[in-house]
Image (cartoon, helix red, strand yellow):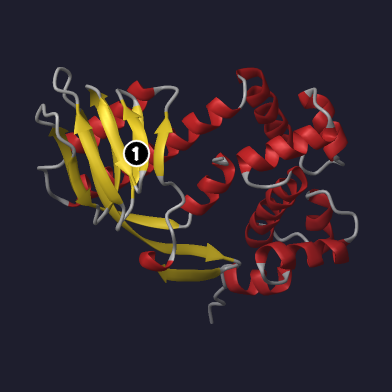
Amino acid sequence: MIKPGEVMSKLNRFVFSISLVGYKQCIPTKQFHTWEHSFHSIWIIAKGKGELIIDGTNYPVEPGKLFFLKPNMECERYSDSKEPLEYFFVRFTYAIAHVERENWKLEKGENVEFPLSGMYKLQNPPQVINLFEQIYYLRKRRGAIVAMKRKLLFNELLLTIIQDFRSQKVTGNTTNAIDTTIEYLISHYNEKITVHSLAQQAGMSVSHYSRLFKKFIGYSPMDYLRHVRMDRAKELIVLSEYKLKAIAQSVGYHDEFYFSRTFKKVVGMSPTEFAKRHRTKRVTKK
């Protein structure tokens, strides 16, 4: 079962390059077309009916269905003779490049498995198809601006897909309740906040709220709060002249030593080390 929060956390570590964009209009036939897939690609079915067999699993194909295909998958495709298949596709490659505790982590894409595979149903296919169309429209254009726009659109496509998955997992009221507590965390991070008080706001039990929060956000409520506090602390360390104790209190910690330990655990270095690395150095004129 897909966990949108975990998938999004993994995708945030990826850097993508689009290798090919296309729109396929299948020839009506009663025969299966068989091949071994050689690329990472995403398909969105725009029209028609048929079947797609991926590594022995049979999937009915119809408009709005989404497929993630990987290298070395054995595939068979059948297009209905009366309503032949038409679909957009994007082939892509990726590498892993992200900052973790102030250090860049780099890794080749072939060493890390892509987190989505097979068929998925969409709740709002037109929104996803529209993004495929925009990427397809740029396929013949060149230039630095076009390349940047294509990258942004592809990332927006992945984000829209994950948001669609998330909306399928919970009702609108539940989603709104979690989002409301997130807004509360952001606005009141310097106050005393407990999981119990957040769960009460959301109208859920503590266990149910914590489980849903982790599933859709990728952090536990308290981990999320810690990261919000540390992000604000980093701003204050770099941009203000406050003492460490004042910074700790301003982000909700009365014990500056506990704050320092938490900061190092989250950021990967002490507040003092962070200040030395990121504060602008003053130049004294002679």
Question: Against 273, is 78 above or below?
Answer: above
Q: Quadrant of the C terminus?
A: bottom right
Res 123 → quadrant = top left
Residue at disc 1, secondary structure:
strand
| Residue 73, image x, y percentages | 31, 53
Q: Disc 1 residue type?
A: Phe
- Left or right of 155, for residue 211: right
Front residue of 23 and 104 = 23
Q: Residue at x 61, y 38 (%)?
A: 216
Q: Residue at x 42, y 63 (%)?
A: 96
The residue labelled by disc 1 is 67
Q: Quadrant of the N terminus?
A: top right
Q: Residue furthest bottom?
A: 286
Res 124 → quadrant = top left
| Residue 13, image x, y percentages | 47, 57
Dot 1 alpha-carbon crowd within 10 angstroms: few under 14, some 14 to 19, many 20 or more: many
| Residue 143, image x, y percentages | 14, 50
Front residue of 276 and 103 = 103
Question: Against 178, is 8 above or below?
Answer: below
